[in-house]
Amino acid sequence: MSGSNKSEIATSDLMKQYVMPNYGRFALELVRGEGSWVEDDKGARYLDFATGIAVCSLGHCHPVIQQALREQGEKLIHCSNLYQIREQALLARHLVEKVMGAAGKVFFCNSGAEANDTLIKLARKYGNQLSGPGGRYEIITCEGSFHGRTLGGIAATGQDKVKAGFEPMLEGFKHVAYNDAEALENAVGDQTVAILIEVVQGEGGIHVVSEVFLQTALRLRDEHDLLLMFDEVQCGLGRTGDKRTWDAVIEKLEPDAVSWAKGLAGGFPMGAVWVRADRTTKNAAGDNGAEGQLCDALGPGSHGSTFGGTPLGSAVALAVLEEIEKERLWENAAQMGAYIERALADWDSDLIQSVRGRGLMLGFVLNVAKLEQNEAFKQSGQTAALFVVSHLMDKGLLTVPAGVDVVRWLPALNVSQEDVDLALNKLKELLNELGG
Ligand SMILES: Cc1ncc(COP(=O)(O)O)c(C=O)c1O
């Protein structure tokens, strides 16, 4: 078939015929983006408060990303992790010194699920070293959490819907209610080796961790020699108004390991894991019986990823993180987030039950009972979240559903107040139309 013939076939038809149907997709086809704005194939413009689900941290096609792609693309795009990679080393240094501000080392991969699989392997390795194979390997995670779609990720995730049809699950996970400190305490047993927490849950509908829950996790870590691991894949790197999401809950807390992805390279696929240095394992870096640092526990040959930390990906991620640092974009996230929350509080709309989250990771909890008084909603057969997200899209604002009743706003960290005002106007207009 000739190229021109092919181009006449609608993208949605091509997708239907050739792409696996594992995503529910809107009809929208985006072809261009700049800053907080995107354009579809028909030339309609949208304000993007979805950002690829918290990925385009600097907005679309930011000049520093374009420059990094161009300059590194002309030098060296890929080489194996068999060799020294300067861009990867510089990126790791930035994450250790500027983001964590705590001694440790970094592993690079390509996604959040892969980063969390690394955390799971780290915990297992640590447990094996403490108590031999099959000794301590259990990881406690939270109900409502989301940790990715790999077999490790779905086993770790505290939501049945991601596990259904893929049983039997990888064993070794216990889920406790989020922010239930007593349940967390009761869940720790002889085989427990780690606790994995999203400091702000994203896919589960935007829930913020409580101080008591984190304090309890810290105490249990110390009492039972556990690893305290944070999944910062969605909430990390400035999105919630802090470089380290947990800073707003407990200052100077040092977790043992952290995973990142999504916004790390602003749209280029990149995941990473930081592991703490000042904690010993029995025989890190190999199995020779010597004591070593936790950050060396995954020694040569124990883990890897062909595309992890390539020169190109690392150069782009470093450019993104340097821009976040230079412009202190976590502060803009905090300010704009507070501004949005104030606006919503002023409206006091019947259709919005509450606003959850922090910074630019916000969830509007819809009042489904009130929305049910709207005939169009009743006829739609959609969840409340999907209904509102679809109608906002019709008004030129892209947002993301979370669960059945939460609409998420995840704008770029550098979003302007002008664009926030526009988004607020679109939301207000819709709420008025829907009778709220
Ligand atoms: C908290 C969290 N962890 C892990 C993941 C999985 O990341 P990825 O889709 O890059 O594998 C996600 C994705 O939504 C996430 O929100």
Image (cartoon, rainbow, N blue to C red):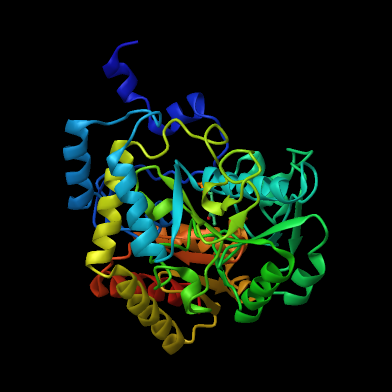
The quarter of the image holding the N terminus is: top left
On screen, residue 80 above or below 345 = above
Judge from the rendering whether residue 302 lies leftward or rightward of residue 93; answer left or right: right
For residue 171, what is the image quadrant? top right
Q: Which x, y percent locates residue 14?
A: 43, 27
For the question of whether residue 346 can be seen, the reply is yes
On screen, residue 272 above or below 354 = above
For the question of whether residue 178 can be seen, the reply is no
Which residue lies most toward the top here? 1
Judge from the rendering whether residue 110 lies leftward or rightward of residue 20; answer left or right: left
On screen, residue 363 above or below 53 = below
Along the viewing direction, whichever of 59 and 255 lies nearer the viewer: 255
Image point 17% across, 51% down: which residue? 63
Along the viewing direction, whichever of 26 and 58 lies nearer the viewer: 58
Q: Which x, y percent locates residue 26?
A: 46, 46
Along the viewing direction, whichever of 315 and 209 lies nearer the viewer: 315
Q: Which x, y percent locates residue 211?
A: 60, 80
